[in-house]
Structure formats: C-alpha cells, structure tokens
Image (cartoon, helix red, strand yellow):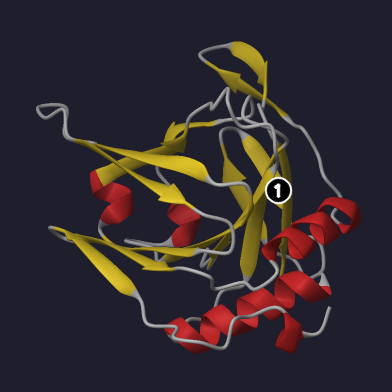
C-alpha cells in the first residue's frame, strides 16, 4: 500500500497529557483506512504465539506477536529473544511518518495482534536496558478500540488511569512514563473484532 493512502493528511497536532515527569501524546485518525491496513497486516505478517516462563511456569502469550526492524537487531523481554525480520513495506511507511512527526529514528517495531476481546496484555513497562533510559515509544492502533489502562509503579499509591485507544490512533509514551507507570490492555468480553498494535521503539544496545 502506498504511503499516501495510509495517512490522514489533516491536523496532526499531538494532544499531550502531562503526568508529572511522564507524558502521553495522542493523535486521533493518524492512520486512514485503518481497517484495511489491519486486514493487510493480518494476512502479510509472520505471526507467532510464543511461550514465556513466569515464576517457573510456562504460559502461552495471550495474543499473537511479531518483530520487525533493521538488520541484525534483537529485543529481549520476558525471557524471549526476538530477532528482527526485514521491514515490511506497510510497517516501514508507518515508521517513516512517525519519524517525521516526532523527529525520531525508530529502528524496530513490536506487533501485537489481539484476535478478539479475550486476547490481552498484562501490566508491564517497556523499560528493558536495550531501549535506553526513559525511552520514547510510539504505539499505533489498528482495528477495534480497546482500553489502555495505567497504574502508578509507586506501591504507596493506587492511582489508575485509562484511555480508549481507537483504531487509527497514535499514542506516544514519553518522558519518564516507563519508569513511573505500568500499562496493559485488559480483556473485553464484549469485543469480538480484532486489533493490531504497532509499538515502534529504538533499540540502542
């Protein structure tokens, strides 16, 4: 798909939510025809469903995943090592547009495919050493809308926030978000449609 057909050329201003030293930015309708892009990636991406070990027990990841990026790069989390597949054209087009908007230089993208509302992402932070200190991460949603839930990492507080990530939106996690907050995508038994999430990041080590 040509890049010109991927993106809404309207207002691309980022709406920022300030959370102390953390920042969340939202651009609605960043990807135009996001359902078409969703279906294209469903068909073209080499999806996997890995198994991870948590507290000595093996668990199948409750969603499908894939990892693409620059040649030779790896990304490790939850005991898994992902080796980047070569950039697929649609993914590279999305990356280029985000790099232009944010003045970034992302070199990888981790994809998560939620087949329906039963697929989830547990609370976590993207704080692996390979991403550097206070990484900036850009997350694109395609397909169905899902809840994005955050909770403070400070065990003394019970602060929670949530936003709805709509299909076609861009979420930017910046500042100290990864060190101050955990985030996840809980189950939604009412949602039967699928969603793909693209999280662009820069692996530095």
Left or right of residue 201, residue 24 in this image: left
Count the marks: how many? 1
Near mark 1 (Cα within 10 A), the count class, few <14, some 14-19 or many ≥20, is some
Judge whether 51 appears above or below 161 on screen: above
Give above or below for 170 relative to 62: below
Residue found at x 66% / y 15%: 58
User: Is label 1 in a helix, a strand or a loop?
Assistant: strand
Q: Residue at x 72, y 76 (%)?
A: 92
Quarter that holds the N terminus? bottom right
Which quadrant of the figure has residue 90?
bottom right
Query: Residue 19's x, y, as percent?
Result: 17, 56
Task: Determine whether, in the image, residue 163 is placed left or right of residue 114.
Answer: left
Residue at position x 40%, y 43% from top? 125
Kindly indicate the quadrant of the structure image that contains residue 106.
bottom right
At 58% across and 64% down in the image, what residue appears? 168
Q: Residue furthest front?
A: 190
> Foreground residue, 190 or 19?
190
Residue 23: percent from the left, percent from the top? 26, 63
In-front residue for pair 203/27: 27
What residue is disc 1 on? 82
Instruction: State the residue lying farthest toward the top.
Output: 57
Residue 108 sits in which quadrant? Answer: bottom right
Left-right relation of 155 to 204: left
Residue 14 at x, y = what percent? 35, 76
Question: Is the residue 94 above or below the residue 82 in the image?
Answer: below
In the image, residue 126 above or below residue 86:
above
């Amino acid at each position: 798909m040509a890049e010109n057909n991927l993106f809404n050329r309207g207002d691309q201003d980022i709406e920022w939510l300030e959370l102390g030293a953390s920042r969340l930015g939202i651009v609605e309708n960043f990807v135009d025809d996001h359902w078409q892009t969703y279906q294209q990636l469903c068909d073209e991406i080499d999806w996997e469903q890995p198994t991870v070990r948590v507290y000595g027990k093996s668990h199948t990841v409750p969603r499908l995943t894939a990892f693409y990026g620059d040649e030779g790069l790896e990304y490790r989390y939850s005991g898994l090592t992902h080796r980047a597949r070569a950039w697929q054209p649609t993914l590279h087009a999305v990356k280029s547009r985000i790099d232009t908007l944010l003045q970034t230089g992302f070199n990888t993208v981790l994809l998560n495919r939620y087949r329906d509302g039963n697929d989830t992402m547990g609370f976590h932070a993207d704080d692996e050493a390979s991403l550097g200190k206070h990484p900036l991460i850009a997350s694109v949603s395609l397909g169905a809308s899902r809840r994005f839930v955050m909770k403070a990492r400070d065990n003394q507080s019970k602060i929670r926030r949530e936003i709805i990530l709509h299909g076609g939106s861009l979420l930017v996690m910046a500042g100290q978000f990864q060190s101050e907050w955990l985030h996840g995508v809980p189950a939604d038994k009412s949602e039967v449609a699928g969603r793909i999430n693209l999280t662009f990041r820069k692996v530095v080590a």
